[in-house]
């Protein structure tokens, strides 16, 4: 009877250890995902800034084209 109780306790401990290992693995994956998300946030901000400069350059080119056409045909 005592050996059955000991065996059951050992089995439960093994299950707990397995769950803890699974939790640690999940935690590591979550940390990696969080770090990637933070890095992607920086990349997105940089891309938005670059896009802002692109639109300003395009608008400036259009304005200069219109001004040069007005001056040329005046």
Image: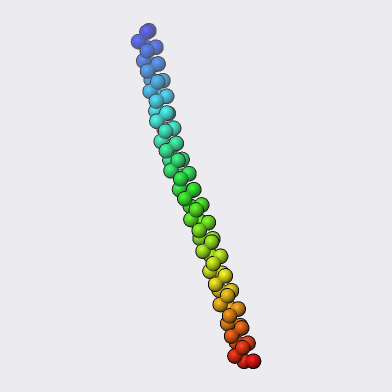
Q: Which quadrant: the C terminus? A: bottom right
Residue at the bottom extreme, as displayed:
74
Looking at the image, how many numbered discs can be counted on the residues? 0
State the residue at coordinates (56%, 77%). 61
Q: Which quadrant: the N terminus? A: top left
Measured along the vertical axis of the image, is residue 44 above or below residue 7?
below
Query: How far from the left and from the top, in percent, is residue 58?
Result: 55, 74
State the residue at coordinates (58%, 75%). 60
Query: How far from the left and from the top, in percent, is residue 4?
Result: 37, 12
* Colouring of the image: rainbow
State the residue at coordinates (63%, 87%). 70
Residue at the right extreme, as displayed:
74
Measured along the vertical axis of the image, is residue 68 above or below residue 16?
below
State the residue at coordinates (51%, 60%). 47
Query: How far from the left and from the top, in percent, is residue 13?
Result: 40, 20
Measured along the vertical axis of the image, is residue 29 above or below residue 57?
above
Residue at the top extreme, as displayed:
1
Query: How far from the left and from the top, in percent, is residue 45?
Result: 53, 56
Which of the two residues, 33 or 59, is positioned nearer the viewer here? 59
Is residue 6 toward the left or the right of residue 51 in the image? left
Locate residue 20: give its quadrant: top left
Which of the two residues, 18 or 33, is positioned nearer the viewer here? 33
């Amino acid at each position: 009877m005592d050996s059955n109780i000991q065996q059951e306790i050992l089995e439960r401990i093994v299950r707990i250890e397995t769950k803890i290992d699974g939790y640690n693995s999940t935690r590591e994956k979550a940390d990696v995902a969080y770090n990637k998300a933070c890095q992607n946030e920086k990349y997105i901000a940089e891309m938005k800034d670059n896009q802002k400069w692109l639109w300003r350059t395009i608008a400036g080119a259009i304005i200069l084209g219109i001004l040069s056409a007005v001056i040329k045909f005046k």
